[in-house]
Image: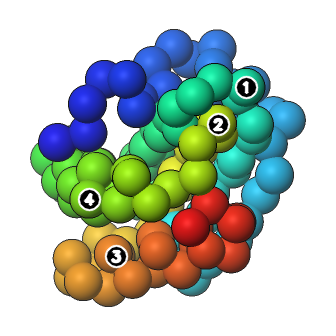
Amino acid sequence: MLTKKYRLKSAEEIKNALKNGRFVRGDFINIKLKANGLSETRVAFVVGARVAKESAVRNRIKRRLRAIVAKQINSIKKGFDVVVLTERGIKEKKFQEISGELESVLKSGGLL
């Protein structure tokens, strides 16, 4: 589980990262990242209704993403706000595919 100190919580912080952050595109996962000046990297996950209509499916995707980030949190560079954005294709992907894609996007963004 991703502990609270590593989570972006307020809508204002998430909007700020989305508006002013640098965009990195993947196949079905994209990220927006912005330096935050803190000693921790904070992460938020956005899974919209366009990705999956059912909330149970959206929540399962977010749980998977949180688990992947929790495993890699010590190897991610410190001092960034990261918003993980998903696209429609993620719903059919297996855990290993999601993990590989997220790792690839984080490397492209210079976070790993």
Answer left or right for 61 relative to 16. Answer: left
Query: Residue placed at 65% from the left, 39% from the top?
Result: 80
Mark 3 burial class by Cα count in 10 Å: few <14, some 14-19, many 20+: many
Is tag 4's residue or tag 1's residue first in the polypeptide sequence?
1
Label 4, label 3: how many angstroms apart (C-alpha)? 13 Å
- In this orientation, which residue lies closer to the viewer: 21 or 86? 21
SS assignment at label 3: helix
Q: Are marks 2 and 4 in contact (CB under 8 Å)?
A: no
If you read the primary sequence from the N terminus, does the residue marked by circle 2 or circle 3 appear first? Answer: 2
Please, what is the three-letter code of the amino acid marked with disc 1? Answer: Gly
Residue 62 appears in the picture as rendered: yes
Q: Position of residue 23 (x, y in %)?
A: 77, 58
Instruction: Tell me the residue that label 2 is attached to.
Output: 79
The nearer-to-camera label among 4 and 3 is: 4
Task: From the top left corner, tell me how far across and down residue 89 is, in percent.
Answer: 42, 77
**Residue 38 position (above or below residue 34):** above
Q: Residue at x 28, y 51 (%)?
A: 70
Question: Considering depth in this image, is 8 or 78 the residue closer to the camera?
Answer: 78
Disc marking residue 98: 3
Q: Secondary structure at mark 1?
A: loop
Amino acid tagged 3: Ile
The residue where tag 1 is placed is 37
Task: Give the Cα distance between marks 1 and 3.
Answer: 29 Å
Q: Amino acid at mark 2?
A: Gly
Badge 2 element: loop
Which quadrant of the figure contains the C terminus?
A: bottom right
Q: Is residue 104 above or below residue 35?
A: below
Q: Are marks 1 and 2 in contact (CB under 8 Å)?
A: yes
Q: CA distance from mark 1 to mark 2?
A: 5 Å
- Residue 88 percent coordinates (x, y): 45, 69
